[in-house]
Every structure is written in C-alpha cells, then in structure tokens.
Image (cartoon, helix red, strand yellow):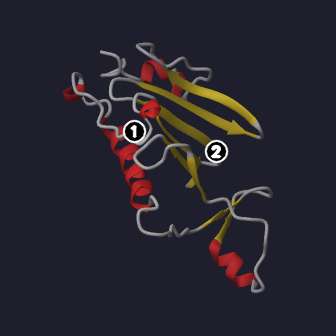
Amino acid sequence: MLIQFKVGNYKSFKEPVTLSLVAAKIKGKDANIDENNLIRVDDKLELLTSAAVYGANASGKSNLFGAFKFMRRFIINSSKESQVNERIEVEPFLLDAEYENKPSFFETVFLLNGLVYRYGFEVTKDKVDLSGYSIRQKIKRRSFSRVKEMLPKSQEILKGGQSSKELTDPMPFFFR
C-alpha cells in the first residue's frame, strides 16, 4: 500500500514535492466516516484510503501522474536487454539551466507484508542510482543500493538464504 510518493526535477517540478497518504490526527464529527476512510496500520500510523489532487490549470496535476507512470514504467522495463544502448527518456525541469543536467528524483514509501519500505532512484538521461530501504521502528536499514556498475550490496539475507546479489542480474544498461 502506498504511503508516500515524492518527485523532484521532473517536468514542472523543480524542487521535490510529496504526495502523502498519511492521515492527519484530526477526527471527524462522524466516527463512521473516519472508520471507512482510514486504514490503521498500527497505533502510530493511519493511512487514507483515497486522495484527491486538484488545482488550477497548469499547476502540475498531470505531471504528478506522469511521474507515477514514469517511475512504474522505468522499474518494469529497466532490466530489458533491448535498452542497453538507449538513453533514458526522463524529462527534467527545463526552466532553470542549472537543473537541466541534474538528476530527476523519484521515491515511494510503501507498506508490504507489515513492513514499511522506501524505494527510490535518481536518474539522468545517461545513468541511474537506485536505493532501497526497509524501515522498522525508526531504524532505517539499507536493503540494497546500485551505484555505477556495482551490484547491490545486501545488508540482509533474503528469503531462502539467497542474497540480493544472487537474485539480481548485473546492471543491465546503467553506465554502459
């Protein structure tokens, strides 16, 4: 379940912006409404079951959803061998020349099987830096990271006694 999505230096987003589904600590007059629209993860975390994105024309609504789509497409397709020599089709913020060659930033925080994970990457047209973390009770534990041509360095052993290095192919197109 999605907890948070963050994007920066992408299309109309110069600085990082965050869409958070963490519920505010306020309660409605009708307890039924709160109960039907919140998911209680634990005593400290409640998530919204839905969110609305609204604003004036040209305020970035479509670009926010475009960032979701880019991140999804990039994760699903980044390991295909057909992309070895292709440039990455990311669109950085272009209204400031300083940002044109800086990496775009994408990050999600999500709940999976009772654990909170943070997964993100920075990407330019030529390279990617990936990182993934599991977050347990205010302890951030790196699950893997990929920088340049290095394979992930696992801090934890994964299911079945396999390390992330055994489960992951070498960098498919990053930095080639």
Q: Residues within 10 Å of mark 1 (few under 14, many from 20)?
A: many
Indicate the quadrant where residue 33 lies: bottom right
Tell me if 115 is positioned left or right of 160 in this view.
right
Residue assigned mark 2: 116
Indicate the quadrant where residue 117 lies: top right
Residue depicted at 47% across the width and 40% down the height:
9
Q: Secondary structure at mark 2?
A: strand
Distance between the alpha carbons at the discs numbered 1 and 2? 29 Å
Q: Earlier in the sequence, mark 1 or mark 2?
A: 1
Is residue 4 at least partly visible in the picture? Answer: no
Residue depicted at 45% across the width and 29% down the height:
102
Q: Position of residue 115 (x, y in %)?
A: 64, 44
Residue 53 vertical placement versus 85 (above, below): below
Q: Position of residue 148 (x, y in %)?
A: 43, 15
Contact, mark 1 vs mark 2 (Cβ under 8 Å): no
Q: For this rendering, which residue is in front, 103 or 78?
A: 103
Q: What amino acid is at disc 2?
A: Val
Is residue 117 at least partly visible in the picture? Answer: yes
Residue 19 vertical placement versus 55 (above, below): above
Q: Position of residue 64 (x, y in %)?
A: 45, 55
Q: Residues within 10 Å of mark 2 (few under 14, many from 20)?
A: some
Q: What amino acid is at disc 1?
A: Pro
Quadrant in the picture for the C terminus: top left
Q: Position of residue 120 (x, y in %)?
A: 51, 36
Residue assigned mark 1: 92
Residue 137 vertical placement versus 5 (above, below): above
Indicate the quadrant where residue 108 lies: top right
Residue depicted at 68% across the width and 38% down the height:
135
Task: Residue lying at the far bottom in this picture: please name it.
Answer: 30
The numbered mark at residue 5 is: none
Residue 107 vertical placement versus 123 (above, below): below
Q: Nearer the viewer, mark 1 or mark 2?
A: 1
